[in-house]
Amino acid sequence: MSNDPAITSSSRTTRTQQRGPSTAAPALEIDHVTKSYDDDTVITDLSFTVQPGRVTGFLGPNGAGKSTTMKILLDLASADEGSATIGGTRYRDLEDPARTVGVVLEPNAFHPGRSGRNHLRILADGGGFPTERVQEMLTVVGLADAADRRVGAYSMGMRQRLSLAAALLGDPPVLVLDEPGNGLDPQGIRDLRGLLRERAANGDTIFVSSHLLSEVEHLADEVVVLNKGRLVASGSLGELQREETLVRSPSPEGLTKVLQSAGGTVQPLEKDTLLVRGLSIDVIGSRAHQAGIELHELSPHSGSLEDLFMGWTDGTDVDATLDTAKEVQSA
Amino acid sequence: MTSLRLVRAELRKLTTTKMPWAFFAVLATITGITAVAVVLGTDADGSKGFISTAADQKSLMAFAYNGLVIAGLFGAIAVAREYGHDTVVPTFLIEPRRHRAVLAQFAAMIVGGAVIGFVGTALTMVAVAIALTATDYGFLLSVGDAAQLLVASSFASATGALLGAGIGTFVRNTGGAVAALVLVLLIAPPLVVQLVSETISWVPGSLALVASGLADEPGMFAALIAMAAWAAIPAMIGLLAVQRRDVV
């Protein structure tokens, strides 16, 4: 796949011009969603909003409920409680869903005996898209030369490119992408990042789940983090990264107890140094003072997304997640 | 307009894999066997009585029940594999009002089934006509009888495809759907007739004979309605089931 052609960013031809920059893409809203399979609750009272004009990364360990949340948003699965809407409307009630939301879901859904071109033609027929759009999208994702080959003979990266072509076919203002970088080579990932950044800059709503923390760190403006079906963090990635405080004290154990009892997450770094999350710098100083604990340093700290992720998820399945990220990075 | 787009997409699904060719091969094989039987086969007394009259030849060329079963397999496999390959997911993303998407799929299956019935009958007629040249008998079927066989087979096969599609939608697994279809069409009817002999006129095989003009009971109109009902019931069950289920 290292010689795969580039995913180009000229994926839109008409909608942006028709819509104009002043018309905002719809926001996605997950409102108190709960979902169980038999006795297993996979999502618990989940609420968050994905804003247009931003790339929102959707993170969580394996089995955190990311894919299920996306499927509920797309009406492929039903919520036991709560609602998921796109611009205030349920997916099934959208006037023209195929022109509103572009979707990549895992696993990719293709008939192995059908060609990539015919897969897109079927979607173009169903969505009422012009047939020229098929060739256009095949070119955009760099599959024009392989378009008439059976999808069963495609590599994983080529399948992923075909999924992207399908998602972009209707030139939708909303993209919901589940692990879109899976199988793409480094150049493909870079091209994808450029494409998504460009669409977000044009006001589109981009919601991307990924295991690749370093990729999300490069791509996302906002993050939503799930762990065991619950929301553990959400907001601007930059702000979240600045929400850590470095504390140095000759009594780290006592300070740890005080800060944990105040609701903070404390990670020991060195002998006398702690990394604190979930408490403001003022509260940390005040609690230490009240407890009579001496401080030698109290300073804001910018953490990497990987550090933050481990803190948010308590290391749940994080080894597998990080392994995946490292494997892809070294590919 | 949306519905027509969806039906067009479903028809393209049917014509962009090798499955139709596999079913064409099945039809060609059955046709070949029929032709060989015409050339080499005899009745118990060594005569060729089974092709000696127009009625005998009509009975030989009646393809409605074969078409119904073959198209049933076609419908069951075509729909169940949509769930197996998850290709139903993009379908439901394009048309999340699932009843519309499934009805479009059923419409395409009806068209596909009718084509199977028509082609199967036409191939059989051509093969028999050619095979008869090797015997002492000519092709005795009237235009009216030929038309009746073509229409009956197309109708029966369309209902068979719908029946199979309904089962495929409900079962969602190719092997399971085929097994269920065999149970519904081939195993259950004779057992039911054994238990309640009055039902013999209402099983698919008997109804196909009536539609082909080869039997009288329960009458043409009733037979067509009954065949449609055989297909409509599993189709309705499939349609209802797909509304409630999570797709993935």
Image: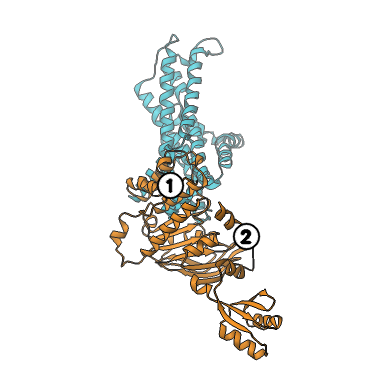
Chain colours: A orange, B cyan
Question: Which residue is located at x 60 percent, y 70 percent?
Answer: A312
Q: Label 2 is found on which chain of the structure?
A: A
- Disc 1 marks a residue whose amino acid type is Pro
**Above or below for A92 versus A283:** above
If you read the primary sequence from the N terminus, does the residue marked by circle 2 or circle 1 appear first?
A: 1
Q: Is residue B29 visible?
A: yes
Is A298 in front, or is B194?
A: A298
- In the image, taking residue B191 as reference, residue B233 lies left or right, namely left
**Secondary-structure class at tag 1:** loop
Is A5 in front, or is B12?
A: A5
Image coordinates of residue B30 in percent, x first then y, are 50, 24
- In the image, taking residue B146 as reference, residue B33 lies left or right, namely right
- Disc 2 marks a residue whose amino acid type is Asp
Identify the residue under disc 2: A38
Question: Which residue is located at x 31 percent, y 67 percent?
Answer: A22
Image coordinates of residue B105 in percent, x first then y, are 43, 45
Q: Is residue B226 visible?
A: no
Whole-number angstrom distance, CA of label 2 to CA of label 1: 45 Å
Identify the residue under disc 1: A5
Please tell me how crowded label 2 is: few (under 14), some (14-19), or many (20+) other residues with Cα within 10 Å.
Answer: few
**Cβ–Cβ below 8 Å for labels 2 and 1?**
no
Mark on residue A273? none
Image coordinates of residue A256 in percent, x first then y, are 68, 80
Please tell me how crowded label 1 is: few (under 14), some (14-19), or many (20+) other residues with Cα within 10 Å.
Answer: some
**Above or below for B89 versus A146:** below
